Amino acid sequence: MNIIFCNINWMKYYNGASEKDRPRHAGVTVKDPSDVFEQNNFRDFNGKCYGYVRSGGDILLDKHFRGVPQGTKSMKDLTIVWCAAINDEEARIVGWYRDATAYKEMVSLPLYEEEYIDFSFMADAKNCVLVPEEERTFVIKTSKSSANRKGAIKSNIWYAKSEYAQREFLPRVTEYIEDYSGDSAMMLIKDLKDQRPQEEITGHEEALLKARESYDDENYRQAVLYYNAARGIEDSYDASYELANTYFKLNGYDEALEIAEKMILAHGEKVELVELAFMASDMVLDMEKAPKYYRRLQELEGQPLTDEEYYEYYNELQSLNRSYKQYI
């Protein structure tokens, strides 16, 4: 097992900073969480997790792993172990990515509204485990200097190459990960499809009201559960459309597109449905669907595209596809 260890700030969910989940460094709350880019390390972005660690430079994969060609830009089949300090002398394992890809140079993946995800590691969300906060019991003593090879190096990226690490530490880590049978605190988007709120919901309108309240509070995961409950009672237009929008907010673009397309078949090409289908397909750089929905949306809004405008968008999408499709 090829392992890279990464030191990051401590959080409960790594699904965006909030008042209830502020990043902490060695037990001290970070004053400006906007500078903590690892805050989304265990967020499900359309079936992927994107891991950030403050590295201070390129990750020299050819230097740290045998058989890797010089200048290698990416390496697959890695295990990325995420660690966070609880004080100056001790850190804990908070989670890991299995079958991950590491990139020599940090990648900036464009989202929307001029937002980006910066990351050095990527893995399928289903292969990522976030240990619940109260169960983070694997202790790593922090070395005060690199000469003391019986603890974690205080560098944010380390490879556990010392004799002690190879003989004792890495086997313990490997065993811990292989034998872990606890829950993951990470919520997968695909798992939300069959979930309902714990409370009993008896009416369609009650479920819709609670879903909208959760949505307005930006508690999108909870909103999905209430929309699921509403659709279970009556699969109304509003419940389905708002559920698709909620999935989009959760970066569940495949789920949003699936619902939007089913609704187009059932209800026709309403502007809001075509717009949602366009936005979702555009986010995953779908070369077939995104241009089609973009052109149709403009027609429905009374502003048909010229061939020049259409191919300007198409060429831009194609360029993004060449650059980013491997990550989407």
Image: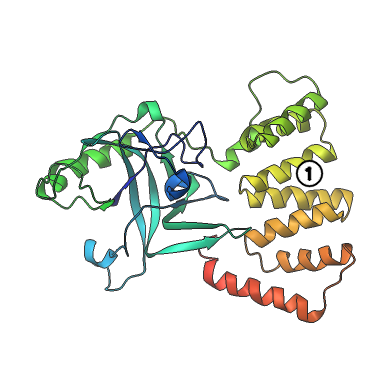
User: Looking at the image, which residue is at 70% across and 18% down?
Assistant: 200
Q: Position of residue 78 (x, y in %)?
A: 34, 54
Side (left or right) of 33 relative to 325: left
Q: Quadrant of the C terminus?
A: bottom right
Residue lying farthest to the bottom in this orientation: 308
In this view, 292 is above or below 157: below
Q: Secondary structure at mark 1?
A: helix
Side (left or right) of 140 relative to 215: left
User: Looking at the image, which residue is at 29% across and 51% down?
Assistant: 156
Q: Position of residue 44 (x, y in %)?
A: 53, 46
**Which colour assignment does the render follow?**
rainbow
Side (left or right) of 273 relative to 161: right
Residue 262 is at least partly visible in this image: yes
In this view, 59 is above or below 167: below
Which quarter of the figure has residue 285? bottom right
Residue wearing tag 1: 241
Q: Position of residue 321 (x, y in %)?
A: 58, 70
User: Looking at the image, which residue is at 62% across and 60% down?
Assistant: 284
Side (left or right) of 186 relative to 264: left
Mark 1: few, some, or many residues within 10 Å (few <14, many ≥20)? some
Residue 66 is at least partly visible in this image: no
Which quarter of the figure has residue 295? bottom right
In this view, 41 is above or below 85: below
Residue type beneath disc 1: Tyr
Q: Position of residue 324 (x, y in %)?
A: 53, 66
Closer to us: 192 or 18: 18
User: Looking at the image, which residue is at 79% across and 49% down?
Assistant: 262
In this view, 274 is above or below 89: below
